Image (tube, coloured by chain):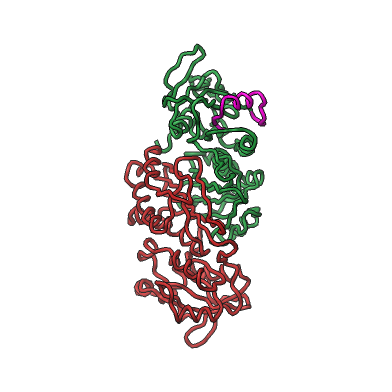
Chain colours: A green, B red
């Protein structure tokens, strides 16, 4: 299978500068644009953990596998350069269109963000479909958004709306690459992370990395219609879903108070920006309800491998 | 599991410049040294395909998973910079020392080649152990060894000895990173590839990429003691094993005639360099036996996914 597939892939990969050598050699050559440094991230998706091949099309799975990696680049304010893709194809699917459909889904997103697929590895083995993507991006040198850069008194902001992504959005979201680059170019942002495992859990990572704490105003959290729909089934509140469901792939970031106010007023992105709380100098993770009552915020969210 | 493991990993990763940000953010920042471009490769190993967890220790498997990637860097004459590692841990192994043992094996090699593990992803799922590694390296700009650069009349050279790697060498080999860098700095090498799938098959890839052919002198092929041992069991000839077994992870490269002669005379590397044939202008892949008889060379070797 491989040679034919690799040839097909080479014809599909859309290799273009800054990739001077794409699929078909031992490795790919990548040069970040002048004045920029390279950003690299990797995420592996597995059948029955991150998707379900019985329910979801291979195209959507391929799309998601690249999208989660581009979301990590966005969280660093990086612009995509290229991706490498390794796939473990289940033996009983090796003769089916599955591998190509995966790539077609990936390619749709790769084209949208000028991120050619520059190499990879395909194995056939017993066991589930595993898709491992490494995404390369670039960001202006020393200007990447880090998790550790939140400052006391920063406001806490989030793009889009949260919760209930398992109703379908976790497969079809658009990574916030363009929004991140627009914010990065025009506004002072301190720390950032993408919400992959849940607002509460990812916020706890951001404040822990920054040696700070946070208070989240529960009634300000933008709740998605999917969270409301899911709440009818689950008996939990919509805001509980927004805090803990994860796979929103929205940006959670911090900025000085006056920048946050300007962002909320101007709304410069195609998606909504909401101020949901503030960074505190103490290291507590807290929530404030509509009545002003403050209590500890549970680190709910998706814990890998638990 | 993840947070504790990620913390442990961060303490283990040995992050150092040129990695300005290691494990624990959304992505890693990597800057190639001035005058060099980045080389990126990825390989995924799966239980029962590339190793057997019932027979091989997790440390050896971790070592191999990084080593095959460093071998790809060596084939481009690149120096390792960093690696990203994604692991799919079988559910019944998630509470065992397996993940740490994998990293300990990887770390042994990472330290040897100053290649810090700069990030990754760990999942627990039903199904086999899958280890996906992306290795980053750097090479002087426009000076990477490519598969496509063989020239007619070039001699065909190989490091080390071939065949029978399945007796153990496929897990414990040292990737030819230092040898490649030494050759790259001091000798005119045209095309190169590492022998992962078998001399015959990888040679066919090199000559195909170069739009050329080759004649291999069968009696010059350096045959490993393992190939001889295996030949006693298999009934095949040792040279058949050397041509088709694969996973030798030696360098196959081409150089002008006078350079090849100098290399064979000087033997500047810690391992033997052998001249095994020549590149031809026609596009045929041929073998010459001890009597001088020329016949087609079968593209034997490991075909992925067949």
Which residue appears at 51% of the width and 87% of the height? B292
Q: Is residue A64 visible?
A: no
Which residue appears at 58% of the width and 47% of the height? A137
Q: Nearer the viewer, residue B188 or B217?
A: B188
Q: Does B52 sit above or below residue A268?
A: below
Q: Quadrant of residue B207?
A: bottom right
Q: Is residue B260 visible?
A: yes
The spot of residue A263 in percent (x, y) is: 63, 27
The spot of residue A62 in percent (x, y) is: 57, 44
For the record, the magenta segment spans A251-271
Q: Does A156 sit above or below residue B275?
A: above
* Residue A129 shown left or right of residue B110 in the figure: right
Q: Nearer the viewer, residue A256 or B74?
A: A256
Q: Tell me, yes or no, whether the highlighted magenta stretch contains residue B268.
A: no
Q: Quadrant of residue B159?
A: bottom left
Q: Does B148 sit above or below residue B277?
A: above
């Amino acid at each position: 299978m491989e040679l034919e597939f690799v040839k097909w892939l080479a014809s599909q990969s859309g290799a273009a500068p800054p990739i001077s050598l794409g699929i078909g050699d031992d490795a790919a050559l990548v040069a970040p644009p002048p004045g920029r440094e390279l950003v690299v991230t990797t995420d592996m998706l597995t059948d029955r953990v991150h998707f379900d091949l019985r329910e979801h099309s291979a195209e959507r799975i391929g799309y998601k596998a690249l999208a989660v990696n581009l979301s990590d680049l966005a969280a660093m304010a990086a612009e995509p350069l290229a991706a490498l893709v390794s796939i473990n194809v289940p033996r009983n699917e090796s003769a089916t269109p599955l591998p190509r459909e995966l790539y077609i889904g990936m390619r749709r997103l790769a084209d949208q963000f000028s991120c050619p697929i520059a190499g990879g590895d395909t194995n056939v083995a017993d066991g589930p479909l595993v898709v491992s993507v490494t995404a390369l991006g670039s960001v202006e040198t020393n200007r990447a958004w880090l998790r550790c850069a939140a400052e006391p008194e920063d406001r806490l902001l989030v793009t889009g709306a949260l919760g209930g992504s398992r109703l379908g959005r976790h497969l079809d979201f658009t990574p916030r690459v363009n929004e991140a680059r627009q914010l990065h170019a025009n506004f002072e942002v301190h720390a950032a992370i993408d919400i992959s495992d849940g607002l509460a859990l990812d916020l706890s990572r951001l404040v822990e990395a920054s040696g700070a704490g946070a208070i989240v105003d529960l009634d300000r959290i933008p709740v998605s219609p999917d969270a409301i729909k899911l709440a009818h089934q689950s008996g939990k509140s919509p805001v509980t879903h927004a805090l803990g469901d994860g796979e929103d792939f929205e940006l959670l970031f911090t900025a000085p108070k006056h920048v946050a106010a300007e962002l909320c007023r101007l709304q410069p992105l195609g998606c909504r920006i909401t101020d949901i709380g503030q960074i505190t100098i103490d290291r507590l993770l807290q929530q404030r309800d509509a009545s002003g009552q403050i209590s500890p915020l549970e680190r709910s969210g998706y814990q890998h491998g638990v």
